[in-house]
Image (tube, helix red, strand yellow):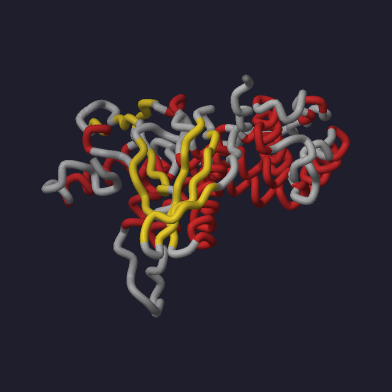
Amino acid sequence: MAGRPRLPISTFGAIKTTEVGAGRFRAMARFRDWDGQSRQVTATGSSRNAAETALKVELATRMRVGNVGNVGDSANARSPFRMLAEAWLEDLMLDVDRANGTKTVYEYELRGLVLPFFEHFTVREVTVGRIELFLKVQRAISYARAKHSRTILSMVLGFAVRRGIIARNPVKETSRMKKPQHTPKALTPDQVAAIRLAARDWRTAEGRMGPKPDGQVRDLIEVMLGPATRIGETLALRKCDIDMTADPPWAHIRGTLVVQSGAGVLRRQAYPKTHESNRVVAVPQFAAEVIDTRMTMFAVVPVVEFGAE
């Protein structure tokens, strides 16, 4: 005798409702979870309908959770592209190897660059030709915009390939984008001097209304210009990252400040923008003087005033 047919992943069987006491009812159903296990799910209510409604809400929640890891069971090539994009985004948020700042940027670019063009298409309608047109429109605005759009779209569709929704990633068959010629330009000594002067004189003009600067912006720019660090790297400098007794003084750039996703607060990340950015750099005299002054001012604190231990 054949047993009960196995439920597909993220689906449930017949709902059974029984009275369990005066004015209380329990609704039950078998649900096949994302890990392949069938589980009995229950909910109670003051009536049969209330119990069944509560159970359906609980089952819907389990379906959403299961779809994060098993979108291939609930989406196919006929599904809306937005559904795939949201599933990819949920999967991205579970990636412990990516920094929160990177996840935030990817989400911003997905919603700002990719979805406005493709949200009304199904997954199978995101063809090589449509992607080619999309990238040309983005390239007309800027190379960087087109490059970021291509990267995000490729990651979303690569996710679809890994989940068996489509057989190939159509982004890989689009035309190669040529990076425009660009010659890096270093600041001249005169330009560095002009920036330092502007930072020193900021909001100090005679008759200027409002509070006077306390020197933090000036000092921050001085230190950024010295070892050529990003603002987040400069703010993350600690006393243990700097040696003012060396000749020349040096700073070990091994952290940065990032915005904690969803909290809107800054925290120190234990490595720079990328792990490859971890470096030791010489600190010129004018920046060394600022750091030395700050360390003296905040000698009671075991870190440079810019950063946190």
Quadrant containing the C terminus in the rendered view = top left
Which of the pair 213/50 is nearer the observer? 50
- Residue found 77% across the figure and 49% down from its top: 117
Horizontal and vertical percent for residue 307?
Answer: 29, 45
Farthest-out residue, left: 300
Q: Quadrant of residue 258?
A: top left
Horizontal and vertical percent for residue 76?
Answer: 74, 35
Q: Is residue 138 left or right of residue 236?
A: right
Farthest-out residue, right: 129
- Residue found 56% across the figure and 44% down from its top: 64
Q: Is residue 215 left or right of residue 101?
A: left
Q: Is residue 110 left or right of residue 227?
A: right
- Residue found 49% across the figure and 46% down from its top: 28
Farthest-out residue, top: 1
Q: How many marks?
A: 0
Quadrant containing the N terminus in the rendered view = top right
Q: Quadrant of residue 130?
A: top right
* Residue 209 visible in the snapshot: yes
* Residue 91 visible in the snapshot: no
Horizontal and vertical percent for residue 182?
Answer: 69, 34
- Residue found 79% across the figure and 51% down from its top: 120
Which of the pair 226/40 is nearer the observer? 40
Residue 21 drawn above or below residue 137: below
Horizontal and vertical percent for residue 150?
Answer: 72, 36
